[in-house]
Image (tube, rainbow, N blue to C red):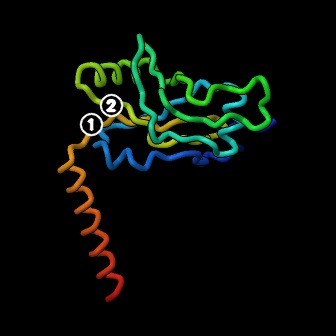
Amino acid sequence: MTKDSDRPTDKISIARNKRARYDYEILDSWEAGIVLTGTEVKSLRDGKANIGDAYGIVHGSEIFLINMHIAPYERGGYANHEPERTRKLLLHRKEIRRLIGAVEREGLTLIPLELYFRKGVAKVSLALGKGKKLHDKRETTRRRDAEREMARAIRTR
């Protein structure tokens, strides 16, 4: 029997949402657990997940993740899962209340940034984001290009 302290604490990344930081201004982020079935976990261990189109919603006093695609497990047979089913997120009650207030009153969006395993448990990094306008996206691209040019100039010296 191994203790929790013997397990590796580093996280093993499964999927990342690269467009999230480009499309949204990230205000705050949380780590949440996900309610999964057995074949979903096996498929995640194979690295077959996509969170590019996923987003979070509030239903009652619970948070759900919609449009997260987990490919069916190859050897799942009849017990396989539905790839894009709605999955419940596990957060503390205080965190859920904070998210409900932000989503319903302030009109913010819940975006998954990364899906990973920590200590053998599937987790999702969930962020509260405000959608960027087109001019904000252009500014982000311009700033990133300027930083890249400065780094290149420093390297060549």
Q: Is residue 110 left or right of residue 115?
A: left
- Residue 152 drawn at (x, y percent): 33, 79
Question: Residue at 69% of width from left, 38% of height from top?
Answer: 43
For the N terminus, the image quarter is top right
Give x and y (percent) for residue 88: 53, 21
For mark 2, what is the residue?
A: 109
- The residue shown at (56%, 35%) is 69
Q: Residue at x 75, y 38 (%)?
A: 74
Which amino acid, by three-letter code, is at mark 2?
Thr
Residue that appears at 45% across and 34% down: 54
Q: Answer whether labels 1 and 2 touch (C-beta < 8 Å).
A: yes
**Residue placed farthest to the bottom in the image?**
157
Give percent across and percent down for residue 120.
Answer: 67, 38
Q: Secondary structure at mark 1?
A: strand
- Foreground pick, 77 / 49: 77
**Horizontal and vertical percent position of residue 143:** 23, 62
Q: Of 22 and 28, which appears nearest the observer?
A: 22
Q: Which mark is residue 130?
A: 1
